[in-house]
Amino acid sequence: MVHPQPLVEKCVIDTGDTTWILVSTIFVLGMSPALAFFEAGMLRSKNTLSIISQVFVGNVLLSVMWLFFGYSLSFGTSILGVIGGLEHVFWIGVPYAECGPMASNLPAALFALFQMMFATITPLLMTGAYAERLRWDAFLAFTIAWEVLVYYPVCHWVWGRGFLSRMGVLDYAGGIVIHTTAGAAALVCALFVGPRRDFASFHGEYPPHNLPLAATGAALLWMGWFGFNGGSALGAGSLAVSSVVSTHVGACCSAIVWLFLSMRAHRPAATGILNGVLAGLAGITPASGYVNTQATIVIGLACGFLSYHGCQFSKGRLGIDDALDVHMVHGATGALGSLFVGVFGNLRDADMGGKFFEFQSGPKQFLLQVFGVVFVGAYAAVATWGILRTLQGWMGDLTHDDDRLEIGLDWVDHGEVAYHKLHVLSQPPGDPKGMMSASVGGETGSLHSLPTEEAYRRRSPNTSAHGPLRSHPSDASGDLPYQTSL
């Protein structure tokens, strides 16, 4: 998005470019509720409001942080190439009618607003990794700390003319800054909080409670990604067109891979198609403005193959309970797409935000991309582990006890339920045991024992809704269906 080449001094705000970035900003803002819908639909009904609240509250909180000091730390005057200065706190010196140093064709405030959308959604991607487990106060503390200690520095290193940008590491729209950081952190989070209690009995295949809602969220994410990548051109020219085309082609190619691989079980899983789309979108993000259409096809196919088998290996062989497979569908594909920039990238005299630059892929660029991915991924993982350990020492256990998890975080954390057919009958939240009874469709039973979950729990260990399923963890191949992948 921002490159180390010298900036053009001339500042001329272009109304066409401004309009496109305004529209793109709206599109990217819509990705946050889309993410909430997708995740809520893929999880169990008793945690619907919990995940929606995390995404919506996170968006509000992170937006205010970006206004107060996040933008300045990310795009302020670089201090030793590590972090930005504080000259733009509260958006001081960020005018609405004049351009800024990062885009000579856009109002400075619009660039800051567009970047706000990226800063808010990045840590929210991780909610899918620790879903249905993390306490509400732990979520708030972790999100704030992670944004300050991971996102702001990495954003400055790559997009804010920090040391990685000066080295020549390229990231068009967030493969390193967003997906690699969130993916690495998601893996650490999943390992740190541990699996949900019934992970083995469900064979890693917790039943999504509302696939139409998940599909709606995925569709809105797909649409929003056009603004995510297309807007990263910082203008309404040919580069934006190329980015949007690559975004769509990459998503489709990845989805085709998931479709055909899932058909090995003789049923094309709807969740597999959704996951394939998201994997392709994440994978093409760092390269969408740098590669041609033919290269996009290769990247989309490769990201689909990697994410499909990566999800199988992660859950089936390793037993990692990343509820929505964020570390594979976002992290692994974002890293792979970033590496492909060094293989297929080839732009000459491209106009991006009033700055003209050129580069061509080759061994040097590929090694730079490898260094950027490895360094940022390692930093995000170590920093995430440090944050979680610190919070654990301060707050105690970051997850609820098993009794409360059985009830569901909607009622435990928020005192509400998403669907009126679930009526809690007994005691208020002082006695988890007393809260377990509920009326489901007119019958009294456990709040967490919905019919669809009972069907999954009672199914033979070697059978899934999509065909044969080898039991975890003893089976050698560890094949799994795709009900809970992101």
Image (cartoon, grey):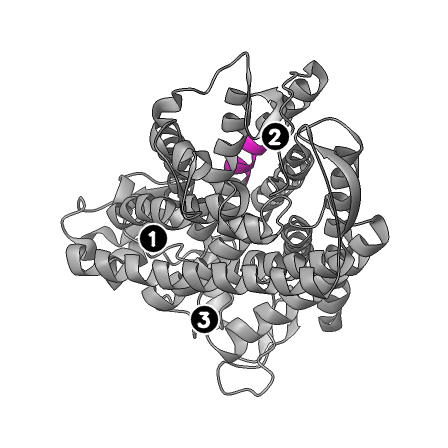
What's the distance in space between the residues labelled 1 and 3, CA to CA? Answer: 26 Å
Residue sitting nearer the eye, 43 or 396: 396
What's the distance in space between the residues labelled 3 and 2, CA to CA? Answer: 33 Å
Q: Where does the magenta region start and end?
A: 27-34
Horizontal side of residue 397 vs 148, given as left or right = left
The residue that appears at 56% across and 30% down in the rendered structure is 102
Q: Amino acid at mark 2?
A: Phe
Q: Secondary structure at mark 3?
A: loop
Mark 3 surroundings: few (<14), some (14-19) or many (≥20) residues within 10 A: many
Q: Is residue 433 magenta?
A: no
Does 457 appear above or below 433? below
Q: Earlier in the sequence, mark 3 or mark 2?
A: 2
Residue sitting nearer the eye, 454 or 271: 271
Residue identified by numbered label 3: 320
The residue that appears at 38% across and 31% down in the rendered structure is 60
The answer to whether residue 419 shows anywhere in this view is no
Q: Is residue 33 magenta?
A: yes
Residue identified by numbered label 2: 27
Q: Earlier in the sequence, mark 1 or mark 2?
A: 2
Q: Which one is closest to the eye, mark 3 or mark 2?
A: 2
Residue sitting nearer the eye, 57 or 114: 114
Q: Which quarter of the rendered picture does the N terminus lie within?
A: top right
Horizontal side of residue 360 vs 437, given as left or right = right
